[in-house]
Image (cartoon, rainbow, N blue to C red):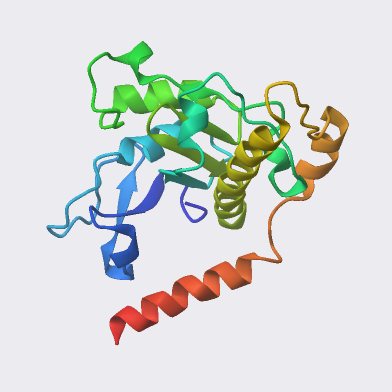
Amino acid sequence: SERDPKRYFLAGHRAPELVTEDDIIEYDLDSNPLDARERESVRERFIHGEIYKARPEVTAVVHSHSQSVVPFSITTVQMRAIFHMAAFVGDGLPNFEIRDAQKGTDLLVKTPYLGQALARTLEGKPAALMRGHGAVIVGENLPRAVGRSIYLEMSAKMQAQALLIAGPGGKITGLDEAEVKASVPLQDYNRAWPLWRARALARLRSERT
């Protein structure tokens, strides 16, 4: 967390739509709960702990099961930066093939070993696909991680639409290297963040009443 780089917070084993403040558990970087209070930990917490270990500059990690991103994780089509809000995609994102680390899994990153393998695949990138599973997205702050998650989903959807329109012989024009370089440092999504935060807090308040 920004408060203590040797600790992170993550919701317990509960459907995301039902999570409240009381469901948030604090962990050390080995993903051991520090205040479990009989709350069950999410099994894939090692995604978060191992990435925080490998990437000290990262203060927020998002794991999603984006329906638009998964198809790119199971095909040879690379995601590209096709619109400015998702410039961070650049010339493509790495794809975590869990079989290379361990065969016969249920695709879930449930051990430190698999978390470390995912962190190695992610390396210094802002996001990585996870074959047949989803994606992991990171940020140096919370708005950036949330924004990248939202726009990665949107970008995947739009790229799939563009591929359909272009057809087998068509061309898709994405951002070039200079445009990516000019765009990414500016993208903290600070204009949209207050709206996303307000919506999340409003949902939380409505579930408490």
* Left or right: where 60 falls relative to 193: left
26 versus 132 height, above or below: below
Report whether residue 121 is seen. yes
Residue 22: horizontal and vertical position, in percent?
27, 68
- Residue reaching furthest left? 38
Q: Is residue 19 visible?
A: no
Q: Quadrant of the C terminus?
A: bottom left
Q: Give the residue at x 66% y 33%.
A: 163
Does 75 sit left or right of 168 as displayed?
left
Residue toward you, 172 or 31: 172
> Which residue corresponds to the image point at 17% horizontal and 57% vertical from the top-left?
39
Question: Residue 122 versus residue 107: which sits nearer the camera?
Answer: 107
Say if 209 sits above or below 4 in the image.
below
Q: Looking at the image, is 23 positioned above or below residue 87? A: below
Residue 201 image offset from top left, x and y in percent: 45, 75
Residue 175 rendering spot, x and y as whole percentages? 81, 35
Residue 94 in the image: x percent, y percent? 55, 24
Lateral position of residue 13 relative to residue 100, left or right: left
- Which residue occupies 81% across, 32% down? 173
* Count of marks placed on residues: 0
Q: Nearer the viewer, residue 159 or 124?
A: 159
- The residue drawn where x is 61% and y is 30% is 125
Q: Hey, which quadrant is residue 142 in on the image?
A: bottom right
